[in-house]
Image (cartoon, rainbow, N blue to C red):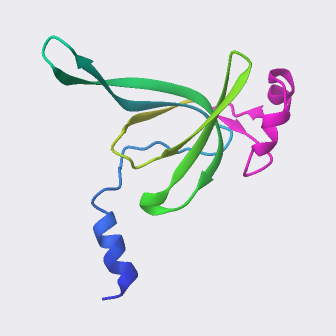
Amino acid sequence: MNKMELIRGVESRFIKEDIPEIKPGYTVRVHVRVKEARYNAKKRQWEERVRIQPFEGIVIRMKGSGINRTITVRRVSHGIGIERIFPIHSPNIEKIEVVKKVKPKRAVLTFIRNLSERALRRKLKEIRD
């Protein structure tokens, strides 16, 4: 048995099957599991709380393969661009929803960092289903 086949066999148990088709240019909503902790002074112990936080933005890059597959999602919040890298098969990712499908002319959309919202809409053409 080859070393790579052994690694793929172990990784195959952790690959999620319910992930939709994602491509650069698509607008996605990624639901991330966030763990918060605070100290309760009365009980004198730490309390943990887990909540789901959605992050919606445009996929500008896909990288890796198999269990190491990641997507970079960008959104503009209060005039400031925010980019987050999400490992698709991470247990902290609750689900991924495709909100809007757009077909760009390039595979990596890092050029949108310099564009305004209006110029961005002009560059990306929406796919009509």
Q: Is residue 26 left or right of residue 18?
A: right
- Image coordinates of residue 45 in percent, x first then y, are 16, 23
Expressed as whole percent of the image width and height from the top left, the position of residue 34 reads: 37, 30
Question: For this rendering, which residue is in front, 76 or 18?
Answer: 76
Residue appearing at x 71%, y 23% in the figure: 80
Q: Nearer the viewer, residue 33 or 66?
A: 33
67 in relation to 90, above or below: below
Q: Which residue does the image show at 35% across and 87% down from the upper left?
A: 2
| Left or right for 129, reference 29 | right
Q: Is residue 100 visible?
A: no
Queried whether the magenta region covers residue 113, the answer comes back as yes
Residue range of the region highlighted in magenta in the rendering: 100-129
Q: Write the residue at 50% across / 55% down.
A: 69
Q: Is residue 1 left or right of residue 27?
A: left
Residue 120 part of the magenta segment: yes
Q: Quadrant of the C terminus?
A: top right
Q: How many marks?
A: 0
